[in-house]
Image (cartoon, helix red, strand yellow):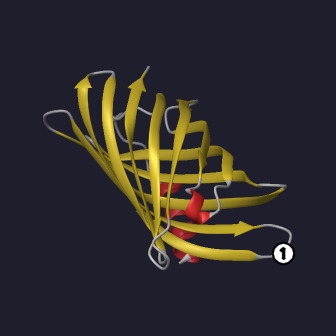
């Protein structure tokens, strides 16, 4: 899977850039995520604040911060993470972009009396599309790696998101990440600037 994503990313970078699509990558995002582990039915909710900015016609950079508290039944740990993002997009149709995105994250799990940290990265590729009547959607497949001092774990997941424009610069969004062992649902607001 990792080799397929890397190959898809390289092919996308070699595609000629067509006329600019209507999709905007200058975004401020505020939202919530809810993670459910299928094995032990543990739920976890956190908030997210993020920003992305186009630095060229096809490249965008971003950063986000997520934080939350696990339910008492799961230990009540305070968790937070900071993520840096880099992405490439190229239109392949008037309102469709081929997108390659990479994230690097550092997270902390504050267990009462101690804390643990982990680093992760993921690389994804997929399609982002704008539809009539202020609707938008995207589907990306990701390869992910998470590690700390004692372990390293690889996984793949699919991210699907949908958005509805309240105005040309404000969008409500919802999405889901489907992993092998859990799923993460997200919703919130995006402000395009």
Q: Toward the viewer: 53 or 160? A: 160
Q: Quadrant of residue 84?
A: top right
Q: Is residue 45 left or right of residue 172?
A: right
Q: Secondary structure at mark 1?
A: loop
Q: Is residue 134 visible?
A: yes
Residue 140 locus on image (x, y percent)? 42, 60
On the image, the x and y values in percent for residue 160 come to 35, 57
- Name the residue carrying label 1: 150
Please tell me in which quadrant of the rendered image residue 3 appears. bottom right
Compared across the picture, whether 126 is left or right of 44 comes to left
Q: Is residue 146 above or below residue 101?
A: below
Q: Which image quadrant is residue 155 in?
A: bottom right
Q: Give me the residue at 50% from left, 39% from top.
A: 58
Q: Is residue 179 visible?
A: no
Residue depicted at x 47% and y 59%: 35
Left or right, residue 37 beside residue 121: left
Instruction: Name the residue rendered at 35%, 52% in the picture.
Output: 175
């Amino acid at each position: 899977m990792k080799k397929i994503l890397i190959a898809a990313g390289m092919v996308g970078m070699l595609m000629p850039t067509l006329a600019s699509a209507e999709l905007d990558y200058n975004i401020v995002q505020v939202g919530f995520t809810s993670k459910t582990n299928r094995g032990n039915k543990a739920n976890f909710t956190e908030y997210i604040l993020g920003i992305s900015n186009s630095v060229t016609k096809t490249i965008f950079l971003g950063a986000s911060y997520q934080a939350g508290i696990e339910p008492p039944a799961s230990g009540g740990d305070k968790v937070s993470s900071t993520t840096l993002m880099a992405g490439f997009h190229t239109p392949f149709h008037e309102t469709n972009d081929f997108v390659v995105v990479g994230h690097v994250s550092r997270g902390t799990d504050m267990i009462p009396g101690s804390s643990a940290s982990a680093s992760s990265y993921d690389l994804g590729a997929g399609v982002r599309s704008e539809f009539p009547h202020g609707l938008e959607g995207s589907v990306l497949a990701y390869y992910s790696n998470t590690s700390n001092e004692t372990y390293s774990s690889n996984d793949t997941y699919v991210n699907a998101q949908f958005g509805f424009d309240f105005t040309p610069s404000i969008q409500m969004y919802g999405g889901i990440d489907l992993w092998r062992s859990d799923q993460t649902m997200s919703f919130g607001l995006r402000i395009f600037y």
